[in-house]
Amino acid sequence: MRYLRAGSGPALILLHGLLGYSFSWRYTMPALAPYATVYAPDMLGAGFSDRLANLDCHMRSIAQRLLRFVERLGLSSFDLLGTSHGGAVAMMAAAKSLDANESATARVRRLILVAPVNPYSAHGQRLAPLFGSRIGSAFLRLVATRTTLWHRYALQRLYGNPDRIPRGTVEGYAAPLAIPGLFEYGINIARNWTQDLQELEMILPKLGSIPTLLLWGSRDPAVYAASAAFLARHFSNVQLKVFPGIGHLPYEECPEEFNRVLIEFLTQKTSPAER
């Protein structure tokens, strides 16, 4: 599993979204480096990590692979940030890290969830299974041959204001498509979407004790900001920040404000039980 590392301090792992990779954090990592040792993996099947045949893409299996990655890093505890599908994986991994019946050796201290896929946003529940269907997957394979056009269209949809898309972003996200198999990874995740969301909803009550920061864009077209209030009910120590006029990728569309809120959360004093 390929990953980037920067900075020094308490460990923080950044999880990208469905068709993203560590490139997503190009504005986040430099800002956080003075405060944390930041790791940004490309999950297996994504970015520039290996494309493995018959890779299990159920959410729980991706979470287990993340925890094995953390174990290989030698960490005993870590903060975990996930965005979009990576946010759902982060919640699943956090639950597993707290479960005495699991073999995880590292514990999640705090969660930062950036527009995480969750059971309360109806949009994703309809669209993702479509892409996992025979017709939807055929469409994705077709657009895979038109990579730059696809990424330009997708980014324009995901930003609250497409004029804020930074130069080089389309090309950056398209780069891993030079390695065959990225769209197959996305299709396999989409096929498990409904089952994964049902399982995610079942584990949410386990997360109540973890200090959590929810970050959303008010104009998010992928995971509706209205779902944040329903998700927040599962956490006893939660903060919510909604960025006005911002879409699904606040770490790119308003990086300075995003980093400011994130650093403020990470540098808050914690109780001994949270360290």
Image (cartoon, rainbow, N blue to C red):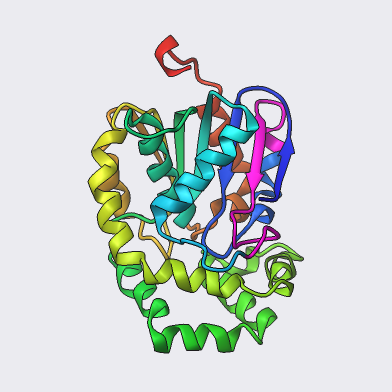
Instruction: Decide if residue 51 is on the left or right side of residue 241.
Output: right
Q: Nearer the viewer, residue 219 or 53?
A: 53
**Quarter residue 129 falls in:** bottom left
Q: Is residue 35 above or below residue 188?
A: above
Q: Residue at x 57, y 89 (%)?
A: 142
**Quarter residue 20 falls in:** bottom right
Question: Does the magenta run of residues contain 40?
Answer: yes
Q: Nearer the viewer, residue 233 or 259?
A: 233
- x then y, percent, for residue 48: 71, 60
- x then y, percent, for residue 70: 57, 35
Which secondary structure type mostly characterizes the magenta part of the structure?
A: loop
Q: Nearer the viewer, residue 62 or 269?
A: 62
Q: Is residue 175 above or below residue 137?
A: above
Q: Residue at x 64, y 53 (%)?
A: 42
Q: Is residue 244 shown to the viewer in this render?
A: no
- x then y, percent, for residue 257: 58, 42
Q: How many marks?
A: 0
Q: Nearer the viewer, residue 261 or 199?
A: 199
Question: Does the magenta run of residues contain 148?
Answer: no
Q: Is residue 25 shown to the viewer in this render?
A: yes
- x then y, percent, for residue 17: 53, 57
Q: Residue at x 48, y 17 (%)?
A: 275
Numbered range of the magenta stretch: 31-51
